[in-house]
Image (cartoon, rainbow, N blue to C red):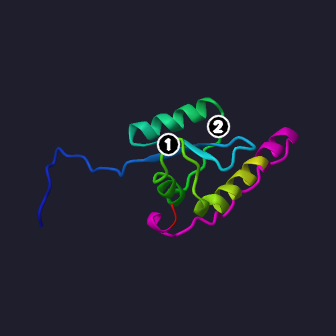
Amino acid sequence: MAQGDPNELPRKPLQSAVALAYKSGEGAPKVVAKGRGLVAEQIIAVAAEHGVFIHESKELVSLLMEVDLDHQIPPLLYRVIAELLAWLYHIEAAQKTGQPRPPAPDLSVPNESPENGL
């Protein structure tokens, strides 16, 4: 049985993060930041500092990482992002009225490859 360098720590997979922005009347949401590792950590930290909602979905982030910066999300992702935005609106409404936070949705993340729909 081969053994590795005892001084080498096991590597965790790099974390990825994508930030989206949506303005009413501008079509689809845009990718405004994305990165892996330290950049992903910084994106998440800045979002948390500004009270921006953070949702974790490895499958969705993987697809969004394929979208160029400052580009709108592709039609393939419209439904899943609409589901996420609808949930966020429900969270905001619940916070304003003192209601409990609604449960996270079971997002319908497409399983198509980026080449087929992005």
| Relative image position of residue 11 (x, y in whole percent) | 29, 50
Image point 52% across, 45% down: which residue?
18
Image point 56% across, 67% down: which residue?
110
Quarter of the image for residue 54 reads: top right
Q: Nearer the viewer, residue 54 or 20?
A: 20
In the picture, the disc for residue 108 is none
**Mark 2, mark 1: which one is toward the viewer?**
1
In the picture, the disc for residue 69 is 1
Where does the magenta region start and end?
90-116
Q: Is residue 62 magenta?
A: no
Is any atom of residue 64 visible in this view? yes
Residue 50 to residue 36: above or below: above
Residue 15 falls left or right of residue 94: left
Q: Quadrant of the N terminus?
A: bottom left
Q: Is residue 99 magenta?
A: yes
Identify which amino acid the numbered label 2 is placed on. Answer: Val
Q: Which residue is mark 2?
A: 52
Image point 54% across, 46% down: which residue?
71
